[in-house]
Image (cartoon, grey):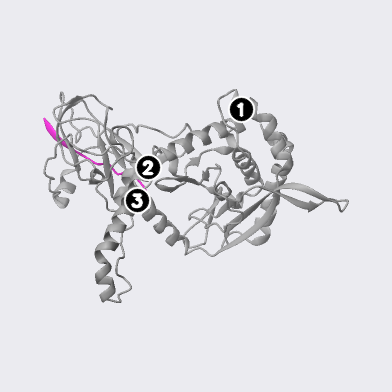
Amino acid sequence: MKQDFYLPDIGEGIVECELVEWLVEEGERVVEDQAICDVMTDKALVQIPAMHSGIISRLYVARGKMARVHAPLFEMEVAGDADAESAPEIPEPVSMPESGSEPASRPELVSPPPERASRESPAAPEPVESKVEGKALASPAVRRLAREQDLDLTQVPGSGDKGRVYKEDIEAYLAEQKQEQAASTLPVEREHSDDSAGQHCVPLSGIVAAMARQMTASLTIPQFTLCDELELDELLRLKHRLTPVFAEQNIKLTLLPFFIKALSLALHDFPQLNSRLNPEATEVSRLPDHHVGVAVDTDAGLLVPVLHHCQRRSLLDIAAELERLTGAARAGRLTPAELQGATITLSNIGALGGVVSSPIVSPPQVAIAALGRGQRLPRFNEAGEVVARELMMVCWSADHRLIDGATLARFNRCWYRYLEQPERMLIQLS
């Protein structure tokens, strides 16, 4: 029996995503739970699995095109008596969040009920070749950049192995196109004084579009910012002693795991910072788990993977998970579950050289911190002598509907005590 299978709802209000790669061909026999294709959402690369065993008879969406949620994705000749309508199983996601984390909504990769199908009456797209010849070799991040620039990747000369296209190749191609366009429009520009001549308008899409929507939503929050200096001398000495211990586990130790663990400990004393305010600002929910989002700069844009349940994690565990998530973010391999559920966020702007930044609260969170660049600066000690200190400027922004300045200042000093005297963390660890 042949049956259409539909792109499932993958959460966060996403209605369409790019089909990055078909992992099967028409006529190929597949087994239950086998990966059928990779799709790219605004934030992550997701694999769609097969619900049943059978033979792929038709692929509806061309590679590189947009697939819509609840529209036909592929047709399959189902083996045996499997019937998705009579037995609506739910496929296991390819990558699940860790045990005990918030459950992600799990998609149903089945035909819609008859009544919904009759209302929507989706027209089946024309069949496409399962293997597109001449497709450029490029990572998902590079493909997304090309789409944002409205480029055909097959026209961009690739400098990598087998013609693989890199970000630098796209930048070089765009620069060359800009020069050619300027040369061809020069006479026109001399004849007209239109300031818009030569402009290149590109619609927002992908991660950039998601950031625009989220930052627009943040305008509804009255925010304020508090900045203070953090002394790092003791923490740096502890990090220096622990670095070889972490290296034995093949983990690179940075300061960020200390910041995250100390933040979780401070949230125990100040649960207001780990809360949610309802839309009407009439009720607050105190959240029991500390899910810390960490901003990561990638070729595709800013991503914020989430370390779940930091209150239950050791420093070693946090460092390992942070390293894994950062690598997955830069490779474009984060799952939706790894990008959801943050209750508070750290942005390490200092990694890019910034000293002071005013971060923006991302609803429904109520606070975010921006970590500045570490600096060795002169300061006076208790005896009035000038001494060198390792310092970092940290700036907090908070939702002023729930957090006042005094509360944020006290919370920040609690967090600082754990970092400036890291032995305090040992007292609290279970």
Give the residue number, with chain letter if any, for mark 3. Answer: 206
Image location (x, y in percent) of residue 395:
62, 55
Query: In this orientation, which residue lies closer to the viewer: 286 or 123?
Result: 123
Q: Label 1 neighbourhood size at 10 Å, few (<14), some (14-19), many (20+)?
A: some
Q: Is label 2 in contact with label 3 (beta carbons under 8 Å)?
A: no
| Structural distance between the alpha carbons of marks 1 and 3 | 36 Å
Evaluate whether residue 335 shows in this view.
yes
Q: What kind of residue is marked 2?
A: Ala
On whether residue 360 falls in the magenta region, the answer is no
On whether residue 4 falls in the magenta region, the answer is yes
Image location (x, y in percent) of residue 177:
29, 55
Image quarter hosting the N terminus: top left
Residue 44, numbered circle: 2
Q: What kind of residue is marked 1?
A: Phe
Image location (x, y in percent) of residue 265:
65, 42
Secondary structure of residue under mark 3? helix
| Structural distance between the alpha carbons of marks 1 and 2 | 29 Å
Report the number of discs: 3
